[in-house]
Amino acid sequence: MTASPQNWRRAERLDADRMAAAVYAETGVRLVVEGRCPGGETGAAHVRWPDGHRSVLKSRPDTRIEELRAGPLTVCEVLRARGYPCPSTELALQVDRAVVLVQQLLPGTPLECLDHDGLDRALALNASQAGLLTEHPRVPSMNLYLLDDGPGYCLHEPLRRHNRRSSALEQRIRAVEAGHPRRLAGHDVVHQDFHHGNLLAVDGTVTGVVDWDGAGRGDRRFDLVTLRFGLHAKEQAPGVVRRLDDILDALPEDILRPCWAHMSLRMTDWAVRHFAPGDVAHWLDLAEQRL
């Protein structure tokens, strides 16, 4: 019943040189690729504009530019108007079936480890996302994909076929959907990938939040569940995980359970398709704590 990760479709990695060439062909702007940004699963690259300023180049496969303008790009405009430290988008361009984004380079580097001050800042940022999309009804609500596959992530079949343990988890995830809406209710900003690796810091102080390409509408507390899964990737400062677990324990079941099911599906599917069997067990251990 075990399937090798090599048999599954993997996420498309950024080809920065090709995308920079496409930008030049379409706009006449020559971006110089300086190298890959640290962290990330699908990749981003530092680029330099003709005037010398530096930015971040990204690509979102299987996406229409209209979707990004209606969702994530609008979300970032709303956040920036409130002083939230997220990057501006300097260029957005459709290139075949992908959208190329060139975004502001914020100061700082990704956090390797979250300490208590960092957690305090993350919680404060999350709280500030509450209700910000009330006057922006066209921003789509987040789909949890508890029954159906997501666009390149949250795939169910890898869990069903990997082994008995992952198959049983997939059945529990589907059962959660039976009692909850498919889309996350609420008018908060949801980052959707709010883990500590997307928090930038200078000398330990958080200076920005990046990677808003999947942002949308819903309940901001979803991002706290995402943060918890991110902390599971490696050892954190003593007491940080326990503090966050206490916060999650206090969430209503109709919020915590579907959000936990989504992240369990997302991370286990990704591990099956991209990582070694031991990594799959690592994510199953966390998923099973609340499912």
Image (spheres, helix red, strand yellow):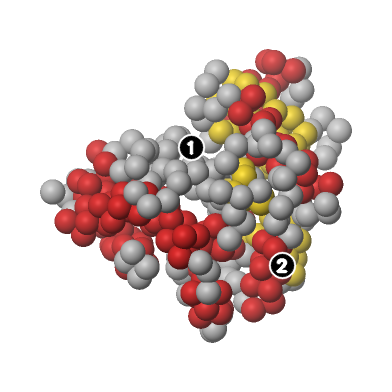
Where residue 130 appears, x then y in whole percent? 70, 56
Where residue 282 appears, x then y in whole percent? 33, 65
Q: Kindly identify the residue that appears in the image at 47 percent across and 60 percent down.
A: 254
State the mark number for residue 124.
2
User: Relative to residue 99, is residue 256 drawn left or right?
Assistant: left
Mark 2 and mark 1: Cα distance apart in space? 32 Å
- Residue at the limit of the structure toward the right, as seen here: 51
To which quarter of the image does residue 140 belong? Answer: top right
Label 1 residue SS: loop
Q: Kindly identify the residue that appears in the image at 86 percent across and 33 percent down.
A: 51
Q: For label 2, count other residues whose C-alpha is less than 10 Å away and answer few (under 14), some (14-19) or many (20+).
A: few
Three-letter amino acid code of the residue under disc 2: Ala
Three-letter amino acid code of the residue under disc 1: Arg
Task: Specify the quadrant that holds the C terminus.
Answer: bottom left
Answer yes or no: is residue 224 visible.
yes
> In this rendering, is residue 1 above or below 28?
below
Where residue 280 appears, x then y in whole percent? 30, 58
Q: For label 1, count other residues whose C-alpha is less than 10 Å away and answer few (under 14), some (14-19) or many (20+).
A: some
User: Relative to residue 26, is residue 237 drawn left or right?
Assistant: left
Where residue 240 appears, x then y in whole percent? 56, 78
> Can you tell which of label 2 and label 1 is closer to the viewer?
2
State the mark number for residue 90.
none
Q: Which is more toward the observer, 74 or 175?
A: 175
Q: Kindly identify the residue that appears in the image at 25 percent across and 52 percent down.
A: 171
Is tag 2's residue or tag 1's residue first in the polypeptide sequence?
1
- Residue at the limit of the structure toward the front, as seen here: 179
Label 2 residue SS: helix
The residue tagged 1 is: 13
